[in-house]
Image (cartoon, helix red, strand yellow):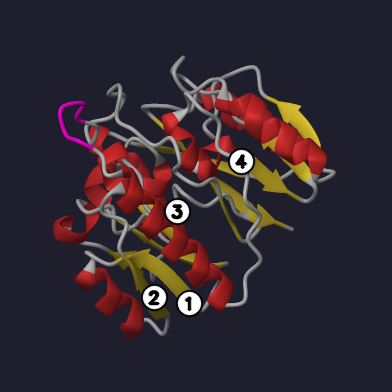
Amino acid sequence: MTPPRFFAVDYAINPWMDTTTPVDIALAVAQWETLRDTYQRLGHVVDVVDAVPGLPDMVYAANGGLILDRTAIVARFKYSQRQPESIAYAQWMNSRGYTTVQTRHVNEGQGDLLPVGEVILAGTGFRTDPRAHIEIADIVGRPVISLQLVDPCFYHLDTALTVLDDTTVAYYPPAFTELSRAQLKDLFPDAIVVDSADAYVLGLNAVSDGRRVVYPAAAAGYAGQLSTAGFTPVAVDMSELLKGGGSIKCCTLEVYS
């Protein structure tokens, strides 16, 4: 995780970002700290990557890359404003002993690359280039399933889908093409289907350890669905970070073994 010390909305690269809306950095930091403390309370280890001045979106650590089996695929960002983040996250990955590799084509890390079981669900349509999906499959030696996003409000896969455990996901169908919805229905017939009210507070931008699901507090309906499915929902308010188009998962770069 990276604290939002320099968080701002100085530019707009997704529909959530409004440069005329002020950002309360103190509130953003407090919400981020609550999320970090929640992870630690649940027994997870949190490494903190230093924030870099001039990189207001670096708080969205999930986009820094994909770490899987000691290999770290470093992000290659689409927009110039975020490209220097790759350097900062690669330095942290190298300092932790991961083998770092890069793709030739745009990939935005765990924003669009979500492992589930032995496969990787990979989003495309707005950020990650589908050619990077092929590169990543070769690097990690796992099947990569491409899913096409069609609604710019759900510009990354992790805004429209939560991986809950090795066989279960939750998702918002209108964010995907008809073909991708069919793929998801075939792969995950017991998936949780989330409604618009929860999707449009980025309720699916959540993190699960297989039992407990840390989710944005505004997604009350999703919390009920999680409980019914046997998961334990853990609410955290991330309303200030939502101004940049991110929430809980966006702020969390998970390390997959």
Left-right relation of 31 to 95 = left
- The residue lying toward the viewer, choosing from 51 and 204, is 51
Q: Which residue is mark 3?
A: 249
- The 10 Å Cα crowd at callout 3, few under 14, some 14 to 19, many 20 or more, is many
Q: Nearer the viewer, mark 4 or mark 2?
A: 4
Q: Which residue is mark 2?
A: 234
- The 10 Å Cα crowd at callout 2, few under 14, some 14 to 19, many 20 or more, is some
Q: Which residue is mark 4?
A: 50
Q: Secondary structure at mark 4?
A: loop
The stretch of residues the image draws in magenta is: 18-22
- The residue lying toward the viewer, choosing from 196 and 41, is 41
Residue 161 versus residue 136 in the image, above or below: below
Q: Secondary structure at mark 1?
A: strand
Left-right relation of 169 to 11 = right
Q: Nearer the viewer, mark 3 or mark 4?
A: 4
Type of amino acid under label 2? Val
Pointers 4 and 1 in contact (C-beta within 8 Å): no
Question: In terms of secondary structure, what is the magenta stretch mainly?
Answer: loop
* Residue 39 locus on image (x, y percent): 53, 69
The quarter holding residue 195 reads bottom left
Separation of marks 4 and 1 at Cα, in angstroms:
27 Å
Type of amino acid under label 3? Lys
- Pick whichever of labels 1 and 2 is earlier in the sequence: 1
* Residue 198 locus on image (x, y percent): 21, 60
- Pick whichever of labels 3 and 4 is earlier in the sequence: 4
- Residue 71: say if magenta: no
Q: Which residue is mark 1?
A: 212
Q: Nearer the viewer, mark 1 or mark 2?
A: 2
Separation of marks 3 and 2 at Cα, in angstroms:
13 Å
